[in-house]
Image (cartoon, helix red, strand yellow):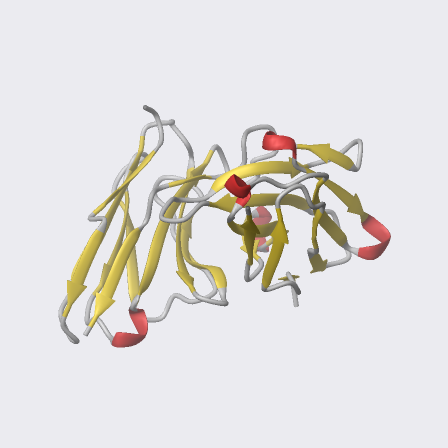
Amino acid sequence: NAGVTQTPKFQVLKTGQSMTLQCAQDMNHNSMYWYRQDPGMGLRLIYYSASEGTTDKGEVPNGYNVSRLNKREFSLRLESAAPSQTSVYFCASSESVRDRGGYGYTFGSGTRLTVV
Amino acid sequence: AQSVSQHNHHVILSEAASLELGCNYSYGGTVNLFWYVQYPGQHLQLLLKYFSGDPLVKGIKGFEAEFIKSKFSFNLRKPSVQWSDTAEYFCAVIFPLNFGNEKLTFGTGTRLTIIP
């Protein structure tokens, strides 16, 4: 089925370790996003990519880096994981940042990350 | 600052009761509005959206929402809830950013528990 695929689904890291969360979409969407979801705080935008070749910071970018590898893929990297980065991470895509005719944003199933 | 508020953090209802979840945003310009639902262990799914036109929007599963511009509100309603509506509900708003970009900002969510 078409959609947004995230890997891995679960991950446990030790403080200071690094890892990359992968995201791929097969809907030919221009824009992709990374959010983190924490209890009582909703979803907060970490980084987004309005189109292939561009990336911009969202609300909570500190401690993260991103790469828009091509139109399909948008990865999120934690260089030195901290317990404060324990969260559920969602990747999303939309036809364009100015998505006014489609179905809004399509979300992946999430990555549950625990940093100990 | 642009923000989205959901004042009901946890709502408990009996089956067949009527539902109204509040959502307010702070921004004086044109916005696009969404309600997403997240069932336990699942990713976000779009319930309904408002871009323009009739301020009463009907979505999936019998949900509807009314955009009241003068009150900066987009409340979600359902006349008769079912046990299967137990989930977390997120209001989201597209706010403008610099250079013609926009971002989807979420409220903190409302956890809805339906008692059989």
Residue drawn at the location 58% of the way across and 55% of the way down: B98
Residue drawn at the location 50% of the way across and 67% of the way down: A40
* Residue A32 picture location, percent across and down: 40, 43
| In the displayed structure image, the side of residue A111 where residue B18 appears, left or right | right
* Residue B93 picture location, percent across and down: 62, 50
Residue B94 seen in the figure:
no
Give B8 or B44, whichever is nearer the viewer.
B8
Q: Is residue A110 above or below residue B55?
A: below
View extreme (right): residue: B70
Residue drawn at the location 78% of the way across and 36% of the way down: B56
| In the displayed structure image, the side of residue A85 where residue A33 appears, left or right | right
Residue B25, image quadrant = bottom right
Residue drawn at the location 55% of the way across and 62% of the way down: B108
Quadrant of the rendering where the N terminus of chain B is positioned: bottom right
Residue A6, image quadrant = top left
Give B46 or A99, whichever is nearer the viewer.
B46
Residue B63 seen in the figure:
yes
